[in-house]
Image (cartoon, helix red, strand yellow):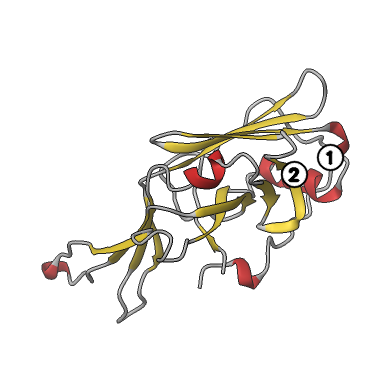
Amino acid sequence: MHLHGFAETKLEVRRRKGGGLHLAGKFPYGKLAVLSSGGRTGRPQKESIEPHAFRYRVEQVDADIHLLVGHDFNRPMANKLGQTLRLNDTESALEFEADISDQMMEVGYVREAMLQFGAGLVGGISPGFTIPPKRTVENAVTYEDEGHDPERGMHNAQIRRVHEAILYELSLVTVPAYDETQLTMRGWKPERDQAIAPKPFGNDIHRWR
């Protein structure tokens, strides 16, 4: 089963000199996201993607990673093996750059995604990944308790820390969970006469439990 993390990340969109668009952004490491508030009586669940958690497939020469719209492999924008998606794994974030050609900008879902982004309807970047089996990486995921405040009646949250993950794709999404950074746009604006018709991204199987 593929899992998805979320980040409201700084994303830049610029026109390329040779035509098309250049996208650049990053997914921050080490930031806590609330996956579940726990409801009225349950236990809150939080998650952190730890530094270099995605390094395995990023550094694997023959492993492809896609840039998608809404975790849908039928809506690709760029890919690593096609050399239109470049990734840089740093201590603080997974950085990426993508080239979107003029031809790809004529594809309906790509144009729609950029229009939604320009209208502020696309909120960030979400990685799609799986966790390696224990026989391969024993401590790929660890869990810890977060301190709580008895006087305020706050529940003790459980924090899931992802140390090793198998990354398959990065997606433009509407509602990110990680909100530490700001999503911005530079150098490209939708034409005034373009209609913006938002549609739901992805399928239920791609959403958090």
Drawn side of residue 40 relative to residue 183, left or right: left
Q: Which one is nearer the viewer's eye here, 187 or 106? A: 106
Whether label 1 touches label 2, CB < 8 Å: yes
Quadrant for residue 39, please give it: bottom left
Instruction: Look at the picture and state if 185 lies above or below 172.
Output: above
Residue at 80% x, 43% y is 111
Furthest toward the front, the residue is 135
Query: Residue 30: where, in percent of width, then height?
Result: 35, 46
- Marker disc for residue 104: 1
Drawn side of residue 164 relative to residue 43, left or right: right
How crowded is the residue under tag 2: few (<14 C-alpha within 10 Å), some, or many (20+)? many
Instruction: Look at the picture and state if 119 lies above or below 72.
Output: above
Question: SS for tag 1?
Answer: helix
Question: SS for tag 2?
Answer: strand
Drawn side of residue 204 relative to residue 195, left or right: left
Instruction: Name the quadrant of the N terminus.
Output: bottom right
Q: Earlier in the sequence, mark 1 or mark 2?
A: 2
Instruction: Look at the picture and state if 155 lies above or below 171.
Output: below
Query: Residue 196: where, in percent of width, then height?
Result: 78, 49
Number of disc labels:
2
The residue under label 2 is 77
Query: Residue 168: where, in percent of width, then height?
Result: 61, 53
Q: CA distance from mark 1 to mark 2?
A: 7 Å
Q: Which one is nearer the viewer's eye here, 197 or 166? A: 166
Quadrant for residue 119, please give it: top right
Tell me the amino acid under the disc marked 2: Met
Q: Which one is nearer the viewer's eye here, 141 or 204? A: 141
Q: Which one is nearer the viewer's eye here, 47 or 112? A: 47
